[in-house]
Each structure stands twice: as structure tokens, then as C-alpha cells.
Amino acid sequence: MVLVLAVLIGYFALGSFVRANAASRLREAERFLRQKENAHAREVLNWLLWFEPRQYQALLITGISLNADRKFPEAIAVLERIPDTSEQFEQGGIALASSLNHDKQFDRALSVLRRHLELFPRSVVTCEELVRLNLKLLRQREATTLLLEFWGRGWDDFGALPLLLELEVKTATPHEAVAVLEGVDRQHPRQPAVVLALARAYSMMGKTEQAQAQFEDALRLNPQDFLTHLLAAEFFFNRGDVESAQRLLKSVKPIEDDRYWFLLCRIADHSNQLEEAHSCLQKVLTLRPNDETYLLKQATLLRRMGQIEEARTAALRASQLAEDRKQLVLLSHKFDRNHPSPEHCLEIADFLERLGYLEQARGWRRVSQLIVPVQPSNLAP
């Protein structure tokens, strides 16, 4: 009995000592973390977390150190314990998403990042992480939309505009993506977002049987997802299965997405319902008026409807947009983000304006005015 009492007294005394020195332990752990001595940082905090499992700063440091040591499952388990009511939640959520991303748990990482951006709508790091993850999943349109929304919330022009330009001229490379996605699927099988990305990659590579199997799996795994239905419908239509495409489109609620209305236009055109096809295309062009693919389709429909002059105008506009986009691609390849010139920024602004990206064009002009030109040295070499 005496021994038990002594042990209890010692235990509570140790706990009191650890709690009393919590601040110094946290400072020491943060110092080890800065010095990249991650294991030492965790050792310093072991006793503190034993007695104070809700010491959220200690959990954050521990999770970040585990992430840095590539112990991703352990980091996830720790970082998940930080509640959204704590001061550490903003930084902890970003660290959690990073660990999930590195551990190839892409679906969970998407969910965490989306919610985090809702809670912290001005977090540049969260936005950049979500953009990168969307690109891994071949969701370039979604990445661009996200960046535009974030830029509209006040992200500075120097940070946002070069990324938007890169996404505008970026071409998806399914051959590179598919090897990564197949590895992800082996590690964490059948994540809906990964399955859909694999379906898209196989489809772009012309592997139709593999693509169909993945699309069918994606629909089964995520039966309410609009993007899954839209992309699957497009795939089936391209294969000549118009009935399946129509069924998939009817099973989702129409939204303001030009891709949805363009597919309806193509289906109507396939059935030779030219007026219906043209009506759908008008909706498409309302949402995305400066897309050469859509304008070429308009030219084709108008010509078949006997509106020759209007068709010629649409075709000329499509041709000019295609040429302007080509020039923008060339300019983007020459752009030096570290040493931009005002003249180059103004050239980019001109072509963006021609393509209908008026807000971005104004942003590039603002950037050109803020760049201080490098003055030539008067000193002899």
C-alpha cells in the first residue's frame, strides 16, 4: 500500500513538473524542429503529451516533425487530433493535407483542403496545395477556377497571374500522369478521384476498354458526383453510345458548366436537331464566349442552317482566337518570373485581352507598372 501510494505521488509530481515546464519544452521542441532534428523534437514532447494529450501546439510540432521524417501515417494520426476550435487548426490542417497527399490519400486530402479553404479563404498555402492536387488528378479546369476565385479574394497579382498564365497554356500529359496514378491506386485502391483521373488518362491515351472499366467504377464509387457523370457521358458519346451518354446527363441536375451544355449540343446535333443544338450552344457561348472550339462548332451549325455569313464570322473569330492563343503560349514560355520586364507583361496583357480575359489583362498591366526597370551600370567593366 505504501509502495502504491509512493508511485502515485511520484506520478502526480512528475505530471505537475512536466505541465509547469510546458512552455520551455515547446520552445525547445520548436528549436529542434527548426534545426531539422525532428526525432529530438518529438522526444522533448513525449512526456508532455503523455500528461496533456490535448496540448495542441505539441501535437502540431509532433505531426510536422513526423511529416518531415516521411512518417506519413503516424503524422496523420497525430494531426487529426487537432480540433477546429484550436489556434493550431489552420497550420495543423495544412500539415494534415500535406501528409495525406504524400501518403497518396488523395481523396481525403481533397476533402481536407476544400474544407480548409472554406474556413480560411485567404490561405495562399491551402490554395496552392489544392491547385497542385487538382493538377495531379488531371483537373486543370477545376484548378484554374479555384485560382481565379482565390485571386478575386485579394491574392496579389505577382503571385496569382503567372500561375493562371501557366494553367491557361498548360497541356495535360496523361502518359506521365497515368504511371503516378496507377501507383497511387495500388497503394490506396479505388479512391473515387483517382479512379476518375485514371479513366480520363486512359481515354486521352486511346485505351478505351481500360477507360470504360474505370469510368464504370468511378460511377459506382461516386454516384452523385456531377463531374464523374459529365466526363463519363462525354466518353460514352465519343464511343458512339449516345443512349448511355443521355442517361448519365439526365441523372444529374443541370448546372452552369459549359462542358455540360456543349455535350447536350453535340447529342442534339447527332440526332440532326439543329435548332436544339444551336440553342444549347448559345448557352455554352454565354458561359465561355471566347473558346475557338465552341465557335468552330457554331460556324458548322450555322452553315448547315443556311446562315452562311454568320457562319463565316464565327469561323474567322475562331481562327483569330486560335492564333492569339498560340502567340500567348510562345510568350508564356519566354516569361521570366524572377525578372519580368514591363514590355513582356504588356504583351501578355494584349493577348489576354484579345482572348477575352479582361480582368487578367488589367492585372498584367498593373504588374507592368510596378516593375522597376534594371538600370544599366555606369561603371566600366
Image (cartoon, rainbow, N blue to C red):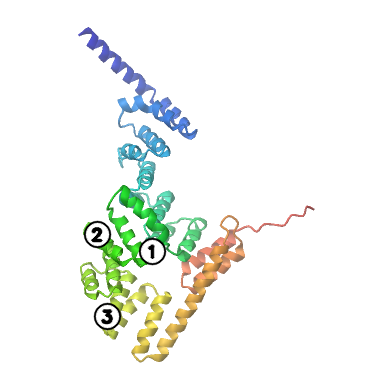
Residue 38 location, quadrant:
top left
Camera sees residue 219: yes
Q: Secondary structure at mark 1?
A: helix
In the rendered structure, the answer to whether residue 380 lies left or right of residue 224 reads right
Q: Secondary structure at mark 3?
A: helix
Q: Secondary structure at mark 2?
A: helix
The residue to which callout 1 is attached is 141
**Front: mark 2 or 3:** 2
The residue to which callout 2 is attached is 217
**Front: mark 1 or 2:** 2
Q: What amino acid type should be assigned to the residue bearing mark 2?
A: Asp
The residue to which callout 3 is attached is 268
Disc 1 to disc 2, C-alpha distance: 22 Å
First in sequence: mark 2 vs mark 3: 2
Q: Residue furthest top?
A: 2
Q: What amino acid type should be assigned to the residue bearing mark 3?
A: Ala
Give above or below for 117 relative to 317: above
Mark 2: few/some/many CA within 10 Å (<14, 14-19, 20+): some
Task: Name the residue located 33 percent from the left edge and 65 percent from the top edge.
Answer: 207
First in sequence: mark 3 vs mark 1: 1
Residue contact at pointers 3 and 1, CB within 8 angstroms: no
